[in-house]
Amino acid sequence: MTAPSPTPMMRRPVFWVVIIAVFLAVAVALAVGIAMSGPSGGADAAVTRTTRPIPSGTAAPTPLPTATTASGPVIPADCSGIYTKDWSPEMHGLVLNPPWTLDPESGVRFGSKDAELVGVLQTTAKVTCVWANPRGGSDAGGLTTNIASVSPEQSAAVIAHMKEIGYNCYDELGGTRCVVETPGENGTVGESHFIREGIWSATWWLNTSPDGYIPDIVTAIFGA
């Protein structure tokens, strides 16, 4: 009796089970290795990519220049700044701010004799310039100018009041000029007021009203 011939290895079921198991193990090992190694360049490359700036499709707007507000006229610190020249020759012997005029009770501290206008000047006048007799008060003549800082509301109220009490008001030199002149017991007395850009030049005078006095103040303070 002849013995049966042995079954080849490739035909045995165990062989194929082993082969499949080996392939599965290799595939799993490759998959794990790829997952652990990550993309080329490692963590540094990943950080570099995430921190690289992304170009914007629109350039950042250039900031607009800040607007500069032009400075307005400034009230001078003293009487030397409200004139462009020495007015002594036109004042016929009167001098600027003799000592007696500095007394608050001298009666010559304000550029108006109207009680309401004086009330405003008492709180707004910054400079007071008095041309007077150096020897003391006199009925011969004199002139007082206040330079005051007023709000738009005060300016409007002052102009309205002067019109109401009969002053002649008109546009001049970029502002409003109001004047009044009346004969008195001791000669001619008058007032000349100029208001522009929050500055009020108030002048009271007795027998002393030199030509060009107010325009010179306007030039000194406003430049034109």
Image (cartoon, rainbow, N blue to C red):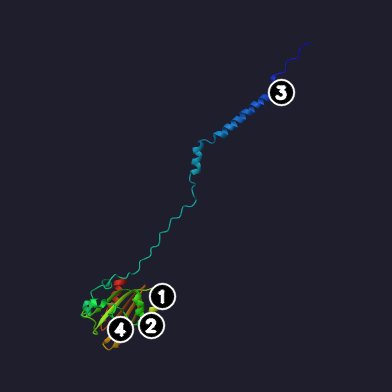
- Marked residue nearer the N-terminal end (3 or 4): 3
C-alpha span from label 4 to label 1: 25 Å
* Above or below for 55 versus 189: above
Q: Residues within 10 Å of mark 3 (few under 14, many from 20)?
A: few
What kind of element bears circle 2?
helix
Q: Would residue 31 be found to the left or right of residue 104 on screen? A: right
Nearest-to-viewer mark from 2 and 1: 1
C-alpha span from label 3 to label 4: 135 Å
Q: Residues within 10 Å of mark 1 (few under 14, many from 20)?
A: few
- Marked residue nearer the N-terminal end (2 or 1): 1
Taking the spot 51% from the left edge, 39% from the top edge, the residue there is: 46
What kind of element bears circle 4?
strand
Taking the spot 50% from the left edge, 40% from the top edge, the residue there is: 47
Q: Amino acid at mark 4?
A: Gly
Q: Quadrant of the N terminus?
A: top right
Give the label on residue 131, or none.
Answer: none
Q: Amino acid at mark 3?
A: Pro
Q: Say whether marks 1 and 3 touch (CB < 8 Å).
A: no
Q: Which picture quadrant has residue 83? A: bottom left
Q: Residues within 10 Å of mark 2 (few under 14, many from 20)?
A: some
Q: Amino acid at mark 2?
A: Lys
> Residue 81: x percent and y percent?
27, 71
> Residue 163: x percent and y percent?
38, 82
Name the residue carrying label 1. Answer: 153
Name the residue carrying label 2. Answer: 163
What kind of element bears circle 3?
helix
Q: Would residue 62 be found to the left or right of residue 123 on screen? A: right
Nearest-to-viewer mark from 1 and 3: 1
